[in-house]
Amino acid sequence: MYHYIRDLPNTSFPRLKGMLTSDFQSQVKIFQSHFEMATLESALAYLQGTYKPSRDLCLLTFDDGLKEHYAEVTPILKELGVQGIFFVITNKALAPVHMNHFLLATLEFETYQKEFYRTLEESCPGMLDTLVITKSLVRHTYPWDDFPLASFKYVVNFMIERDLRDRVLTELFRTHMGDPSEFSESLYVSWDEARAMQKEGMVIGGHSHQHKPLSTLSDKELSWDLTQCRQTLDQQLLPQQELPFCFPYGQRETVNALTLEKLQELGFSCAFLNEPGANYPGQDHFLLQRFDCKDAVEKMLPQVTVH
Ligand SMILES: [Zn+2]
């Protein structure tokens, strides 16, 4: 599972947390030398028990439909002869989780946190006193961040009523970064680019319409979101044999029974969590696990030394 892949020092946001393009390229080569690189089709056939590869399969997935997935990742994968699965947010609006990433990459953390809580307190006096943070949940959700940052991200993404949180983030984003809709055009792939990726052999999948934690939506909003996602993909993409899905945020607890039912009803082929782990024949196609690229080599190939 990959997110940002950039030549970070030479971008406008060198502090953004992501993988360097050169590290990505080396990592794919390591995988290629140890695994059979899967296509979505071969991976699904393996899960169904109809395909028995001689080596373990490795499938590369990329979340959030970022511009660099088109501009940098697709050419690398094409060159190496590997298929990538790319999950796009179908409404193309700047997701609050991404506003948060770019604010964090731009402002000093303490300044940003202070401003965030001040704006929150102005919009909803007394709100701050009601927040009680569960340390283990914070750790589980953001294992890669130090605790102050992890708890801030947890508060922002899970503990504040969503509309209020989005108002606060949008206000801060406008103040420090400019117009969110302009920014989203430079951050996400366009539909033209998504189709160009399909022509290069890549697979595009859904990452929901609005990138909200699905289990927090009402039944009505959940059905609406997933239906919009499916319809937009049908309208915008070239025909594709299989249509995969990836849960926003991706922890097991963000997925409820109605989500799984609805995804199947809408004809999605499978769905991916962010929970680390391998997948085996017979497993539920709608609860597939993934290793994060940050420690995928160590976890999938413990015998390999990483330099
Ligand atoms: Zn996402």
Image (cartoon, rainbow, N blue to C red):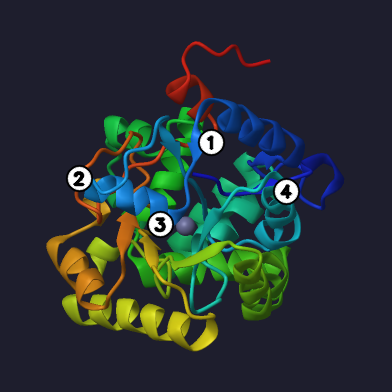
- Residue 34 versus residue 88 in the image, above or below: above
Q: Is residue 210 left or right of residue 5?
A: left
Mark 1 nearby-residue class (10 Å; few <14, some 14–19, many ≥20): some
Q: Which of marks 2 and 1 is in front?
A: 2
Q: Which of marks 4 and 3 is in front?
A: 3
The span from disc 4 to disc 3 (Cα, nearest Å) is 21 Å
Q: Which of marks 2 and 3 is nearer the N terminus?
A: 3
Query: Residue at image x 67%, y 65%?
Result: 187
Residue 293, numbered label: 1
Q: Earlier in the sequence, mark 4 or mark 3?
A: 3
The span from disc 2 to disc 3 (Cα, nearest Å) is 16 Å
Q: Which of marks 3 and 1 is nearer the N terminus?
A: 3
| Tag 2 near tag 3, CB within 8 Å | no
**From this viewpoint, is residue 107 visible?**
no
Mark 3 nearby-residue class (10 Å; few <14, some 14–19, many ≥20): few
Under circle 4, the secondary element is: helix
Quarter of the figure with the C terminus = top right
Residue 76, numbered label: 4
Residue 283, numbered label: 2
Amino acid type shown at disc 4: Ile
Q: Mark 3 points at which residue?
A: 41
Amino acid type shown at disc 2: Gln
Under circle 2, the secondary element is: loop
The span from disc 3 to disc 1 (Cα, nearest Å) is 22 Å
Q: In this view, does 119 lie to the left or right of 48?
A: right
Q: Is residue 306 left or right of residue 35?
A: right
